Structures are given as structure tokens and as C-alpha cells.
Amino acid sequence: MVAFALGTFAQKRTTQLTLYKQFKPSTITLSNGRTIKQSLTNVFLKNSSLVYMNGDNAMEANMENIAKVEFDDRTFYNVNNQLAYIVDSVGYNIIYRIDIFDLEAYNQQIRNNVNITAIPSFTGDMISTSSTDLNNEGDYKLPLFPHFYFLYNGELIKAHEREISRRLPKKDKEVNRKYRTVIDMKGFSWTSNESLSQLLRAITVKD
């Protein structure tokens, strides 16, 4: 199925372990094509995996068996065994985004001796279906970091200057020129939806 570099951006923060505050219904497409419906599901932000309620326990799904997850507001696809959503597409070329906790950045700013590395794996761990907040007061928040991938000319590529440039058609000087023009623009960021959408449009060769 259907990339990542540092840039200047306003880092989002959350007190939630999961994307949605409450577990909600979704339609899950398995890798074998079978479709099932689950009433209580969510996206675990530690590794962008699917979690679901099994009785009173929240369980982490085996991502190798998941192809797609459809919630009421967003559809996720399995990209490297993580749930990713589409930012933009041009023809067959697509940008996918994955949001996960930036634990390394948080640990550099850690306060009150709170050890966030102890976030549960969900495998058999208990969690409320009504709230997935880490704390009630919001006294600490985990930074979320976006990871991007390009599906470019049929190849899945991490969004990074070196990774993208080496996959551009070498003989197409115009595409290479457009690529350099976009990434050299003031304000361009490898962690911005808008910047990467502009880049995708510049390097996609229209038939």
C-alpha cells in the first residue's frame, strides 16, 4: 500500500493516547480483502496502529492484517504497518501522512519526573472508552510529529530531500528544475502539508 525531515513548524501537542477522545465505529478492510465493522476503535498515537475494545480491554490490532480503516471523518491506509491518511494526490502519485508521538523531543523537556516512555502497549491493558486523556489537568502534553511518504511513480518514498531527488527522472531537466525551485522557496517545509502538496504537483509528469 500506499516523507520525513525536520522543518520549522508549530508542533501539535496532545494529552491523549489516541487520535479520538472516544472510541468510535469503523469499517476495517483486511489484507485479504474481507471487510468487517467494529463498534469501538481508535488510532494509537504511539505508533499509529489500530486499537479496538475487546470487552473491557483495549487491544492493539496486528497491523500486518490491516489494509484500510474507515472512520466517519477520515480514511486510513496501511503504510509500513502504520495508519496513514492521504494529504494530496496527483494522478497516481500520493502523499501520505502519519502522526505519532515525538517521545525524544518530549523527554528533552520532561518535567515533574513523569516517565512517558511507560505509555502502555494496549495489549491487554485496560483503558476507558469514554476518555483517553493522559491526565485531567493538561499539565503535560506529548508533542505530535508528522511523518510523510510519497507514493511516486509506483514507489513508496520517505519525504526527504535526498530520497526524493534520487528518484526523479534524471533525463527530465524540467522536473528537476521545478523540484529545486520548490524546495528552495522561502517557507518551504518538509513537515508541511501545503509545501509537500506543492512539491508533488511540481514533480508529477502529466500524461
Image (spheres, helix red, strand yellow):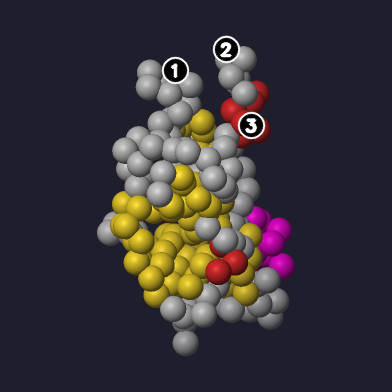
Residue 63 image position (x, y, % from top left):
56, 62
Image side of residue 203 versus residue 76, left or right: right
Gap in Å between the C-alphas at discs 2 and 1?
10 Å
Determine which residue is flagged by label 2.
112
Residue 8 image position (x, y, % from top left):
54, 38
Q: Is residue 144 visible?
A: yes
Residue 94 image position (x, y, % from top left):
48, 69
Residue drawn at 46 percent across, 46 percent down: 58
Please tell me whether mark 1 sits on a helix, a strand or a loop. Answer: loop
Residue 83 image position (x, y, % from top left):
50, 58
Q: 104 and 62: which one is in front?
A: 62
Q: Which residues are magenta?
A: 160-166
Which three-letter amino acid code belongs to the residue tagged 2?
A: Asn
The quarter of the image holding the N terminus is: bottom right
Determine which residue is flagged by label 1.
139
Instruction: State if disc 1 and disc 2 touch (CB < 8 Å).
Output: yes
Which mark is on residue 117? Answer: 3
Which three-letter amino acid code belongs to the residue tagged 1?
A: Asp
Q: 10 and 138: which one is in front?
A: 138
First reached walking from the N terminus: tag 2 or tag 1: 2
Please tell me whether mark 2 sits on a helix, a strand or a loop. Answer: loop
Which three-letter amino acid code belongs to the residue tagged 3?
A: Thr
Image side of residue 45 versus residue 171, left or right: left
Answer with the quarter of the image where residue 27 lies.
bottom left
